[in-house]
């Protein structure tokens, strides 16, 4: 990749010529770091020539009033441990011989600025090197200085790391802007310097992988070393990486079980190659069990509960980066898969009467094979009314006398529900009174 120098308007004075609007474009041996800065105007320090001096892009009027426009450009790129020549492109000199020298800054080690303005050599250090090129020409009285930067491509140390990482989650980050590739004569070694999260490693391609475990704030840089024919080049990230590792709160996807129906509740774990161990200090509902390796709670609950089970789920993670333990306070509900209810019944004396319970499926599962058994547990049915044990329907002819003019008869009914071989009892209350 080639980055250009910024253009600068300058002027030279040549004998018998008027020089103006000289544009100088520079070479950037580019990838990271961008292009170089613009040139600065030259100054005629000799006092010679037919006109005045040139300062900061002014013009010089020659004796005959003619104008000379000069353009200088560098085109090319440089790579670490690769021989290169960056030739200048000079136009408009009309036979004048250029002479370039370095007045400020340093070229990459192994490279030189030649008198003919070319830049050549075998760079032994990657990075961006700001320089100032002093440009003159035989037969021209003034000189010009131009600021630019030479960038030598090497192994990339450009990364984007996540600012926060869950302990137990996998990290996989590769370098960006990879424009340089090693040859068989190059030995590349990447390393993490500073305080990286334990559990992270870096390979010879610069890929950072691993599973952090220990919570905390970590600041580190990526460094790279290249060996080539007895030469060594080192490069380190200019700015550090800050990564915070936090212990996650483990949540379960399902927390409500239905009696007699299969239940599975799974923890939402960080995506990573960590071994987890699970335990609980609470008591699981009858019929359910906790898998110590996966954290899954599964089984078939056998008894509905009035209050949820409060469980302290303890999760311990072990990995190459360390160990952490976290607690999850889980409320696990166990309820009947059906909701059974009677409404209060109003009967006409001496008239037929029918009242049936309403049954609602609380779960989202089909209740195949479910059966009910209704038993009068308390109270007395009015004479002439009966309770169907299978359906719970109360029917018959309400008596024409007795029970007062507006008395309601309270009835306690126990319903035994059987599903998938599991039975449980629910107590209901209803009232029947004359209209």
Image (cartoon, rainbow, N blue to C red):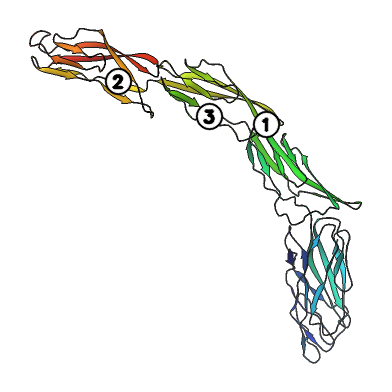
Could you classify mark 2 by the number of other residues whose Cα lies within 10 Å: few (under 14), some (14-19), or many (20 or more)? some
Query: Which of the 4 image quarters holds residue 368?
Result: top left
The Cα–Cα distance between marks 1 and 2, rounded to whole angstroms, is 50 Å
Q: List the residue tagged with mark 1.
A: 213
Q: Nearer the viewer, mark 2 or mark 3?
A: 2
Give the position of the N terminus as an image quadrant.
bottom right
- Residue 35, image x, y percentages: 73, 63
Q: Element at badge 3?
A: loop
Q: Is residue 224 left or right of residue 270?
A: right
Name the residue beneath numbered marker 3. Answer: 251
Residue at 31% in and 25% down: 360
**Is label 1 in a helix, a strand or a loop?**
loop
The image shows residue 127, relative to residue 410, as above or below, that is below
| Residue 89, visible in the rendered structure | yes
Q: Where is residue 33 in the image (x, y as percent from the top left)?
A: 74, 58
Tell me what residue is drawn at x 38 percent, y 14 percent. Answer: 423
| Tally of numbered discs | 3
**Residue 65 in the image: above or below residue 325:** below
Report if residue 347 is visible in the image.
Answer: no
Q: Hey, which residue is sitting farthest bottom in the picture?
A: 64
Q: Contact, CB < 8 Å: mark 1 with mark 3?
A: no
Location of residue 409 by image quarter: top left
Q: Pick whichever, 225 or 244, lies toward us.
A: 225
Residue at mark 2: 340
> Dot 1 surroundings within 10 Å: few (below 14), some, or many (20 or more)?
many
Q: Where is residue 102 in the image (x, y as percent from the top left)?
A: 87, 67
Identify which residue is drawn at 77% across, 89% down.
Answer: 66
Q: Distance between the residues labelled 2 and 3?
A: 32 Å
x then y, percent, for residue 350: 8, 14
């Amino acid at each position: 990749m080639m980055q250009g120098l910024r253009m600068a308007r300058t002027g030279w004075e040549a004998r018998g010529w008027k020089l103006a609007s000289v544009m100088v474009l520079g070479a950037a041996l580019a990838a990271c770091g961008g292009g170089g800065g613009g040139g600065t105007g030259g100054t005629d320090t000799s006092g010679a020539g037919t006109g005045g001096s040139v300062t900061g892009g002014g013009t010089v009027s020659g004796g005959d009033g003619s104008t000379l426009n000069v353009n200088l450009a560098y085109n090319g790129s440089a790579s670490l441990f690769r021989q290169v020549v960056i030739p200048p492109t000079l136009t408009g000199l009309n036979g004048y011989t250029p002479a370039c020298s370095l007045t400020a800054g340093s070229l990459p080690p192994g490279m030189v600025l030649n008198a003919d303005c070319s830049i050549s050599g075998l760079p032994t250090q990657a990075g961006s090197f700001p320089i100032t090129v002093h440009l003159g020409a035989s037969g021209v009285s003034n000189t010009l200085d131009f600021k630019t930067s030479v960038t030598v491509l090497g192994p990339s140390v450009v990364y984007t790391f996540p600012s926060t990482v869950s302990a137990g989650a996998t990290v996989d980050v590769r370098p960006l802007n990879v424009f340089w590739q090693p040859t068989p004569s190059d030995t590349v070694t990447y390393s993490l310097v500073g305080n990286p999260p334990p559990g992270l490693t870096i390979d010879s391609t610069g890929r950072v992988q691993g599973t952090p475990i220990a919570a905390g704030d970590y600041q580190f840089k990526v460094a790279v070393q290249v060996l080539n024919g007895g030469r060594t080049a080192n490069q380190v990230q200019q700015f550090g990486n800050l990564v915070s590792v936090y212990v996650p709160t483990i949540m379960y996807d399902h927390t409500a079980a239905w009696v007699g129906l299969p239940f599975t509740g799974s923890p939402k774990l960080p995506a990573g190659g960590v071994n987890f161990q699970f335990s609980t200090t609470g008591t699981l509902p009858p019929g359910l069990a906790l898998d110590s390796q996966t954290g899954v709670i599964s089984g078939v609950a056998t008894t509905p509960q009035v209050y949820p089970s409060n469980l302290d789920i303890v999760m311990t993670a072990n990995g190459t980066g360390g160990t952490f333990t976290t607690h999850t306070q889980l409320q696990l509900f166990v309820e009947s898969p059906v909701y059974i209810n009677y409404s209060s019944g109003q009967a006409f004396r001496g008239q037929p009467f029918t009242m049936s319970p309403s049954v609602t499926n609380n779960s989202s599962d089909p209740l195949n094979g479910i059966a009910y058994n209704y038993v009068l547990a308390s109270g007395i049915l009015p004479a002439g009314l009966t309770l169907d044990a299978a359906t719970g329907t109360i029917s018959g002819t309400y008596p024409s006398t007795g029970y007062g003019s507006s008395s309601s008869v309270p009835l306690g009914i126990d319903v035994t529900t059987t599903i998938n071989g599991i039975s449980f009892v629910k107590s209901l209350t209803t009232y029947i009174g004359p209209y």
